Amino acid sequence: MALSPHDQRALGDIGARLAAEDPHLAARLRAFTTSTTASPPSRLRMVPVAIAALLMAAAALVLPHLADSGGAATAPPASQSGAATP
């Protein structure tokens, strides 16, 4: 929920007074602040993670089939419909 401009100014004044009275505490509390500009990069960091997860899932689905066939493509077995082949 966004703060009104009046509330943002009041909060900024409180922060400025805190920094003037106790700079050490203000520095420690600053580590816990988040801004709206910090959110998009953290979301962007998830893109490579999602891509890696998809690649790992695809590999988990494909590798067992490659191991069964010895890594080479094989032809399907000949049908045994009763017709004799020479």
Image (spheres, helix red, strand yellow):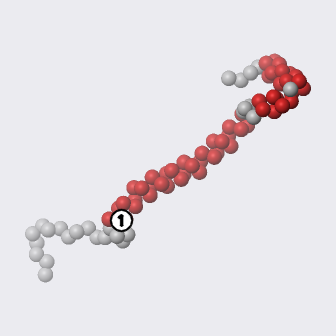
Rendered position, 16 above or below 51: above
Looking at the image, residue 17 sits to the left or right of residue 49; the answer is right
The quadrant of the rendering that contains the N terminus is top right
Residue 73 versus residue 85: which sits nearer the camera? Answer: 73
Asked if residue 86 is positioned above or below residue 35 in the image, the reply reads: below
From the viewer's perspective, is 55 left or right of 77? right
Residue found 68% across the figure and 43% down from its top? 41
The residue type indicated by label 1 comes to Ala
Which SS class for mark 1? helix
On the image, the x and y values in percent for residue 36 come to 72, 33
Residue 34, horizontal then vertical, whole percent: 72, 33
Q: Position of residue 60 (x, y in %)?
A: 42, 56
Task: Give 22 or 86, whichever is nearer the viewer.
Answer: 22
Q: Which residue is mark 1?
A: 67
Where does residue 42 sit, x and y in percent of width and height? Answer: 66, 42
Relative to 41, 14 lies left or right = right
